[in-house]
Image (cartoon, helix red, strand yellow):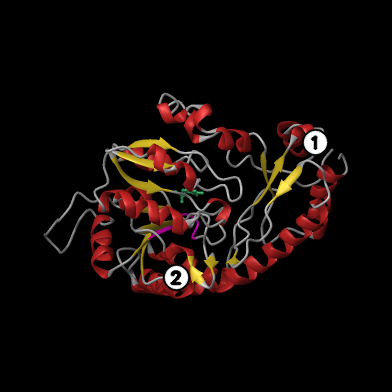
Amino acid sequence: MNEDRILVTSPLLPDLDEFHELLKEIWESKWITNNGKFHLQLEKALCDYLGVEYLSLFTNGTLPLITALQAMHITGEVITTPYSFVATTHALWWNGIKPVFVDIDPSNCGLDPDKIEAAITPRTTAIMPVHCYGNPCDTERIQAIADKYGLKVIYDAAHAFGVEVNGESILNHGDMSTMSFHATKVFNTAEGGALIVKDAETKKRVDYLKNFGFAGETEVVAPGINSKMDEIRSALGLLNLKQVDEAIEKRYQVAIRYREALRDVIGIRFFDDLPGVRHNYSYFPIFVDAEHYGMTRDELYFKMKEQGVLGRRYFYPLISTFSTYRGLPSASPENLPIATRIANEVICLPMHHKLSDEDMSRILELIVGEA
Ligand SMILES: *Cc1c(COP(=O)(O)O)cnc(C)c1O
C-alpha cells in the first residue's frame, strides 16, 4: 500500500572513502582509544565550532549528565523538567538524587522560570533544565534564581548543538552543559556525547572521572567511571563536523517548507525562529489541538504511520508518568498541566538533511489534506 517509509531522522554520515583514510591511520598507529590523536583533535575542533572553552568527549550523552552531577557533588533534590528524553531524570536517579518536576513554558517547551521558586526546598541543590528541541531556555532568569538560592545549573543541551543566542553559544550558560552525539542528533559520532565546563581545573576533574578516576599511572583520585570516546568514533566526528553546517542549512529549508504549508492549518501549532537565535532545526514538532484540527494527535499520528510516515511523539509519555517516578509528589498531572497537555499534542515530523521535496509533499498532504 505505502511506498518507502519516511523515517523521522537519518544519520549524518561522512564519505566512506574519507572515513577509510582515517581508519587506516588508526590501524597504523595501533592506538584506538584513551586520549588518542583524533580524540584530542575532535575536542579542539568542537570547542572552536561550538564557541566554548572546555569540552570533554564522552561515549554517549547520558554519562556526561551522570558525571556532571558527580563532579559537582550534587545531592538531595534537583529541579528538572518532565518534558524530555528519559535520560535526563535517570541521571539524577543514578546519583541517588530526588527529581522534582516543574512545569514547562509552552513558548519554548523548557522549564517555566515562573514555577521554579515554588519547588525549591532546603534540600534543593541544583536545577537541570533542557534546551528542548534546541529552543534556548530562559537562561537569564534561571541563573538569577540559582544565584538567589545558591544552586548549581546543569543544562541538558543534547538538542542544542550549535545553537547561539545573539552570537553567543548557548552552551556557555549555567555551570555545565551536556551534549549527545547519538545517531539521531544533528551532529553524531554514532554514539557519543560531551560535557562542557567553565575552567581548566574542572575539565581535568571531569577527565579523571571519565577514566575511572585515574590521575596518573597508579593514582586514583575519585570513584570514576569509564565513559571515554574511542578513536574510531572521534574520527567519524571529525568528518561529520565538516558537513554539519550544510546539514543544518538543509534542515532549515525543510523547516521553511513545513511552516509555509502549515501556517494556515487551523489547530496545528509549530515554532517559528526566535529573535536573535541561531537554531539548528534538530526537530520539527507540531502541536495538534484536536478540537480545532478535527482529529486527535494520536489519530493523526497513526494515520501517518499507516501511510509509512513515521513521526515521533517526542515527548510522550512524560518522564513523570513512568513507574519509577510517578509516585513522586511533583509528578502529579495537576502539578504539570502544560507539559501534560503538550505531551498529548506533539508529533515531531520527519526532519533531516536527506528529506526530499517528494517526501515533504507526502508528509504535508497527510496533515493538510485532511484539515
Ligand atoms: C539524546 C538525549 C539524551 C541522551 O543521549 P544519549 O547519547 O542517547 O545517551 C539525553 N537528553 C536528551 C534531551 C536527549 O535528547
2 and 1 marks in contact (CB < 8 Å): no
Q: Is mark 2 within 8 Å of ligand 1?
A: no
Label disc, if present, on residue 15 of the rendered structure: none
**Label 2, on which residue?**
46
Q: Which residue is more in the foreground, 19 or 258?
A: 258
What residue would you read off at disc 1? Answer: 292
Question: Counting residues from the N terminus, which is met first, the one under dot 2 or under dot 1?
Answer: 2
Image vertical order of residue 56 relative to residue 61, above or below: below
Nearer to us of marks 2 and 1 is: 1
Q: Is residue 311 magenta?
A: no
Q: Is mark 1 on a helix, strand or loop?
A: helix
Quarter of the image with the N terminus is top right
Q: Which amino acid does label 2 sit on?
A: Leu
Secondary structure of residue under mark 2: helix
- At 83% from the left and 50% from the top, the residue drawn is 264
The residue segment tinted magenta is: 189-195
Residue 192 in magenta stretch: yes
